[in-house]
Image (cartoon, rainbow, N blue to C red):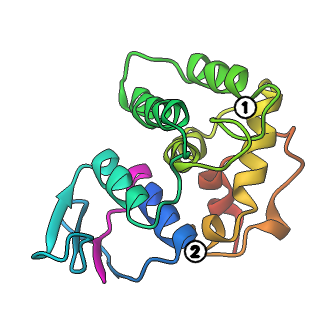
Amino acid sequence: MLDFYYVATPQGQQLLMFLEETGLPFRRIPHAGALAMVDHWPADGGEAQALQEAGAMLLYLAEKPEFGLPATMRGRVEARQWLFWQKSFECQGRQTAELFGTLDRQLAGQPYLCGEAYSVADIACFPWVSARGTALAAHPHLARWFHAVSQRRATQLAYGREMSPFLPDPTRDISLTALAEVLP
């Protein structure tokens, strides 16, 4: 069992999406003072493992059910690069259009950030794209990806409502933040 000390931030959403995607048993503890996790059943069978820092928690969790990291070394390196790249969204000096352009180029010709398989990199980037709420129409590959990820059951569970009937055409501007403001 995992105790997940949830804070409503993009980092918190990343972890919630991952937990919903994998079905790992967890207890969500909302309104925590800080984002953290305690694994009461660590893989090594030892004492409970306490974790903090969203990226470290995502990597730890990805190794637990062997979900989200590709099987090959090159694939794992690429997934980790995108996982750490998403930290760019936290930097004030970077512009959303530049970040969205980078994602759009990466997604050209492939369904997910690391190719054919949905990975921890997609989970790490999605909440930041959602939180930025800027025009996705200028980034068609990113818009297609955003729409596909938003349709996943785990994403819908993590965001607390069935989103599929409310999502518009992926070529239109959308963010889950804006969507939440207009939903009942």
**Residue wearing tag 1:** 135
Q: Position of residue 139 (x, y in %)?
A: 77, 26
The image quarter in which residue 44 lies: bottom left
Check the image and report above or below for 167 versus 40.
above
Res 84 label: none
Disc 2 on helix, strand or loop? loop
Res 160 label: 2
* Residue type for callout 2: Gly
Check the image and report above or below for 10 versus 94.
below
Q: Position of residue 172 (x, y in %)?
A: 84, 40
From which residue to which does the magenta span run?
1-12
* Residue type for callout 1: Ala
Compared across the picture, whether 101 is left or right of 31 comes to: right
Residue at the image point whose x is 31% and y is 55% from the top: 57
Disc 1 on helix, strand or loop? loop
Answer whether residue 7 is magenta in the image.
yes
Residue at the image point whose x is 58% and y is 45% from the top: 122
